[in-house]
Image (cartoon, rainbow, N blue to C red):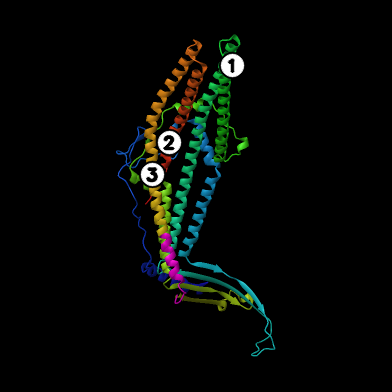
């Protein structure tokens, strides 16, 4: 198709000049100012590297620092089968496809449109043409190319690339949220199992105590009131055990959903090895400096990419005020005889630019530009809010982590004292110095203190997970 060469040659010649003279309208993106702090308060012994390592790096598999094989298995299963994570991944693929569509606008659109047309004109109209049926065969090759003189296509691509980056970091945020929720649910289960063990052990002791009190009542050394109190304490303890079992079942079912499994067929029984995980040393979490949070937390980075996309769309809206120039060309063959279709005399071609100049749009372009600027301002506020929320979450977790150390130390002393008090009360009752009411009161105190200790142990691990999540977890890829 040699006649088509002039069109291609013309496009080739003007392309360098066109790209060299591009006037890209609209603002270039700059990261807006956001609230910041020089350092965090209340760093605890489990937080390391605040000053010496301003931008610490955590492993993407951050949960392995807990040295818990059961947790490692749960995280692997969740990452493979969680449906919310698959939704986030599909959105990344959608954004990648949208970016590819926008990128195609940089290039010419070329199409082949072959046709066969047979027609006959009427003999009863004015200016009668030959009424003999005729057939026309056509094989054209069409080209259309928008010359991006004012950067509309460039800004559109800038926007879609930023949206693709935002969807990617949103996926990382979803991954971090999922892994943190799995770890939190896992340690919540362990804490419930430990508390349930305390309650069940107490129930066993109270069954034995009830037998002894009944025996003493039969021999006349205890009253029926003592028996009633012992029966009440046993029933109350059994009711507490049932309540904890319900909470454990609900938590286990929630974990099944996180793992992408059906709750009725999912069972995670307590084991000694899993409970021992709560007794191990808490991992050290590198907090770094507050400024590092802007590049470590995927939700903040996603908010900034969304802001950059909104900024680019201001340029797209502004380009609508300027002329749009397109280069169109066509070349091919046309003949009434298919045997002559590819002969030299059957060749045809055309080339020419088209110009679109908006003169009156009824305020549409101004309204679109105002909307784009308002969306940008909305995203600026959302970005700053995400930064403020991130700083609050980190500070909350740091303060809680430090104070939970003091609380745990005090709680350990309380457990020791409560157990000793229960033993002394039992001995004083056996010796006949006090009533059974004092034994009940001491045992009830010991049970509550030990249950609180089990909950506090789980809370310390859950707070450490919250700190890791607030700091951005294992996601530390720098963003330009």
Q: Please state which of the two labelled residues, at mark 1 or mark 3, is closer to the viewer.
A: 1
Task: Decide: few, some or many residues near mark 3? Use Cα within 10 Å; few <14, some 14-19, many ≥20.
Answer: few
Distance CA(mark 3)–CA(mark 2): 14 Å
Magenta region: 358-376
Q: Residue 215 colored magenta?
A: no
Magenta segment, prevailing SS (helix, strand or loop): helix
Q: Measuring from the top left, give residue 433's x and y in whole percent.
A: 47, 12
Q: Residue 371 colored magenta?
A: yes
Residue 161 is at least partly visible in this image: yes
In the picture shown, does residue 77 fall above or below 301?
Answer: above
- Which image quarter: residue 65? top left
Could you tell me which residue is drawn at 42 percent across and 20 percent down?
417
Distance CA(mark 1)–CA(mark 3): 57 Å
Q: Are marks 1 and 3 in contact (CB under 8 Å)?
A: no
Q: Nearer the viewer, residue 146 or 464?
A: 464
Q: Measuring from the top left, give residue 305's x and y in whole percent.
A: 42, 54
Q: Measuring from the top left, give residue 443's x and y in whole percent.
A: 49, 21
Residue at numbered disc 1: 224
Q: Please state which of the two labelled residues, at mark 1 or mark 2, is closer to the viewer.
A: 1
Distance CA(mark 1)–CA(mark 2): 47 Å
Q: Earlier in the sequence, mark 1 or mark 2?
A: 1
Residue at numbered disc 3: 392
Could you tell me which residue is drawn at 44 percent across and 23 percent down?
415
Residue at numbered disc 2: 463
Describe residue 44's horizontal placement relative to residue 127 as left or right.
left
Q: Nearer the viewer, residue 429 or 7?
A: 429
Q: Earlier in the sequence, mark 3 or mark 2?
A: 3
């Amino acid at each position: 198709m040699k006649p088509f060469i002039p069109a291609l040659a013309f496009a080739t010649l003007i392309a360098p000049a066109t790209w060299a003279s591009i006037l890209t309208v609209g603002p270039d993106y700059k990261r807006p100012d956001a609230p910041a702090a020089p350092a965090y308060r209340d760093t605890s012994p489990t937080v390391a590297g605040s000053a010496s390592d301003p931008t610490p790096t955590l492993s993407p598999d951050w949960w392995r620092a807990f040295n818990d094989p059961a947790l490692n298995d749960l995280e692997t299963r969740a990452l493979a089968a969680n449906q919310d994570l698959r939704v986030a991944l599909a959105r990344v693929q959608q954004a990648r496809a949208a970016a590819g569509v926008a990128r195609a606008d940089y290039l010419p659109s070329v199409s082949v449109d072959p046709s066969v047309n047979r027609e006959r004109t009427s003999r009863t109209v004015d200016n009668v043409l030959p009424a003999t049926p005729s057939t026309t065969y056509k094989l054209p090759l069409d080209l259309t190319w928008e010359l991006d003189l004012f950067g509309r296509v460039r800004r559109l691509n800038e926007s879609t690339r930023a949206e693709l980056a935002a969807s990617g970091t949103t996926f990382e945020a979803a991954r971090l949220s999922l892994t943190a929720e799995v770890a939190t649910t896992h340690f919540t289960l362990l804490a419930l199992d430990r508390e349930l063990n305390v309650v069940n052990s107490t129930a066993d002791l109270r069954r034995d105590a009830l037998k002894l009190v009944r025996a003493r009542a039969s021999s006349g050394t205890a009253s029926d009131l003592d028996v009633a109190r012992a029966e009440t304490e046993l029933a109350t303890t059994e009711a507490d055990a049932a309540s904890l079992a319900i909470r454990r079942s609900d938590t286990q079912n929630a974990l099944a959903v996180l793992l992408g499994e059906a709750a009725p067929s999912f069972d995670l029984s307590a084991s000694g090895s899993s409970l021992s995980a709560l007794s191990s040393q808490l991992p050290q979490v590198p907090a770094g400096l507050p400024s590092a949070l802007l590049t470590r937390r995927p939700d903040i980075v996603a908010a900034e990419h969304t802001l950059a996309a909104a900024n680019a769309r201001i340029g797209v809206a502004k380009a609508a005020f300027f002329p749009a120039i397109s280069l169109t060309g066509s070349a091919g063959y046309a003949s009434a005889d298919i045997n002559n279709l590819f002969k030299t005399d059957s060749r045809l071609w055309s080339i020419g630019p088209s110009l679109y100049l908006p003169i009156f749009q009824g305020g549409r372009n101004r309204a679109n530009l105002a909307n784009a600027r308002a969306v940008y301002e909305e995203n600026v506020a959302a970005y700053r809010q995400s930064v403020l929320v991130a700083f609050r979450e980190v500070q909350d977790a740091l303060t809680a982590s430090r104070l939970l150390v003091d609380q745990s130390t005090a709680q350990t002393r309380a457990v020791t004292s409560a157990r000793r008090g229960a033993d002394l009360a039992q001995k004083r009752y056996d010796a006949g110095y006090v009533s059974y009411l004092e034994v009940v009161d001491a045992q009830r105190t010991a049970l509550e203190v030990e249950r609180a200790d089990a909950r506090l142990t789980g809370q310390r691990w859950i707070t450490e997970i919250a700190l890791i999540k607030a700091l951005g977890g294992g996601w530390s890829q720098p963003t330009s």
